[in-house]
Amino acid sequence: LSVRDETGRLECAKLYVLPPAVRRRVLRRALIEAGAPAGSLFARHLEEVDRLITGWRGQRAINLPGRVEAMRQGGRLVIRQS
């Protein structure tokens, strides 16, 4: 099961149905690929990003270590350098 769309962005609906532990592993990998240092990513960072999927209420972008930001746009999770 791919959780990315044709442009490589993570699809929130597909992430939502994954078991929480699997979803957090996918998120962690995506954050590291975007430039977040693995040693600086803590559970609270993953929980904040996970809430963009499981508790969406129009939150702003989340600033993460390594000048990485995560935001939700149009049903997609966008993770990029800020």
Image (spheres, helix red, strand yellow):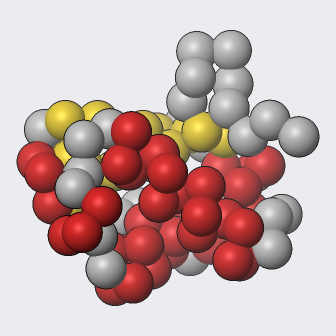
39 to 44, vertically: above or below: above
Toward the front, the furthest residue is 39
Q: Is residue 63 left or right of residue 53?
A: left
> From this viewpoint, which residue is outermost toward the right?
1
Q: Residue at x 24, y 51 (%)?
A: 36
**Which residue reaches farthest bottom?**
44
Where is residue 37 drawn, in percent x and y? Answer: 22, 56
Q: Position of residue 19 (x, y in %)?
A: 80, 74
Q: Residue at x 42, y 73 (%)?
A: 46
Q: What residue do we see at 88% from left, 40% from top?
A: 1
State whether residue 14 is above or below residue 81: below
Is the residue 58 above or below the residue 35 in the image?
below
Residue at 32% in and 38% down: 34
The answer, for residue 57, to whether it is visible in the render is no
In the rendered image, which quarter contains the C terminus? top left
Q: Is residue 3 visible?
A: yes
Of the pair 21 and 62, the residue shown nearer to us:
21
Question: Quick one: 62 or 38, which is closer to the camera?
Answer: 38
Answer left or right for 73 relative to 79.
Answer: right
Location of residue 16 by image quarter: bottom right
Q: Residue 20, image x and y in percent? A: 71, 77
Counting from the top left corner in percent of width and height, residue 8 is at 58, 23
Q: Is residue 35 left or right of residue 13?
A: left
Q: Is residue 1 above or below residue 51?
A: above
